[in-house]
Amino acid sequence: MKYVLLMAVCFFSQLAQSQPDTLFLKTKAAVYDGPIWVRKNKVSANLNQVTFVNWNAGGSNSISGLLGMESSANYTDKFFSWRNNAAIKYGINKQEARELRKTEDKFEINSDIGFKPDSVSNWYYSAKLNFSTQLTNGYSYPNTETPISRLLAPGYLFFGGGMEYGKNIDKMSLYISPLTLKATFVLDDNLANAGKFGVEPAVYDDDGNIVIPGERIKRELGVLINNTYEMDVAKNIKVKQQVSLYSDYINNFGNIDVDWRLDFDFKVNNFVKATFGSYIIYDDDVKTTETDVDGETFEAGAKVQWKQYLGIGFAVNF
């Protein structure tokens, strides 16, 4: 009996020495600590005001404001990347002896998902969705009777798949899609019948009655190239560049639609920030009109659209 007990003690002693941490101690299971979800929200407000009293050089009192809201939810791991964001911007301006005018109106949703076959590669098989429109009526001021644009008139939807390169995909990305669907929505009867934003106009009879209503949705299939780059150029100064190039295979292939944004963010402190930016658009489907010496309007074709903005205000991130 003593011999059996002695053998048992020796056995458990040797076993405890070979596995001291796992045999008698309860350990927690390993937890994956890689990046899972990163959620960000930002609310900003810019206000500019000018007042003149007995000002010899002249000028008009004015006040303008811009409200912006952004929200994002991004997931990344060793093989997958899924990025989602939504943004709303709305700005107005009021000058003395002039009607209230809209200066900014944007509602946009983006979602893209990517998969890479191994954890070393920087290339993703990717699919992207983008939807954008405006919230309120747009006018050719000072005419505020007839809208030239409305909610979902136009609205744009891009959806396609391709390849995306990004070593740090949140900061730098190059996306190439050989097959991207572009849908243009003009869900307003007057604008659709007039053939605005590239849709087919209505067909009228000799008495001016509509025989065939104007097209409300225009569909295109083409190639899309997106590039995004973000970097810190100096302390508290960040620059972000976004460019989108699209060409339809069927209608005028080689005629490129351009959407290019360049933004500089200046951080004063955690709440006070300034923004300077440039926004260039060229879309062959968006035609302009001009008026001749006789007061008759005529189509002048597509032109480059450019907007420059500078704002100082408050921003809260949460």
Image (cartoon, rainbow, N blue to C red):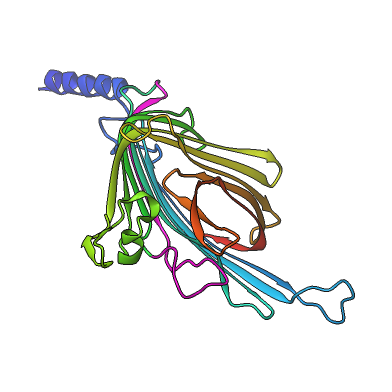
**Residue 126 in view (yes/no):** no
Q: In this view of the protein, can residue 267 be seen by the observer?
A: yes
Q: In the image, residue 223 lies at what x, y percent?
A: 36, 31
**200 versus 175 height, above or below:** below
**Residue 129 counted in the magenta span:** yes
Q: Residue furthest left?
A: 1
- Identified at 33% across, 22% down, the residue is 118
Residue located at (27% from left, 58% from top): 214
Q: Position of residue 26 (x, y in %)?
A: 28, 39
Secondary structure mostly seen in the magenta stretch: loop
The answer to whether residue 233 is above or below residue 313 is above
Which image quarter: residue 252? top left
Residue drawn 71% across the image and 72% down it: 49
Query: Which residue is found at the position 44% from the left and 71% from the top?
Result: 146
- The spot of residue 213 in percent (x, y) is 24, 60
Q: Quadrant of the N terminus?
A: top left
Q: Which residues are magenta?
A: 121-150
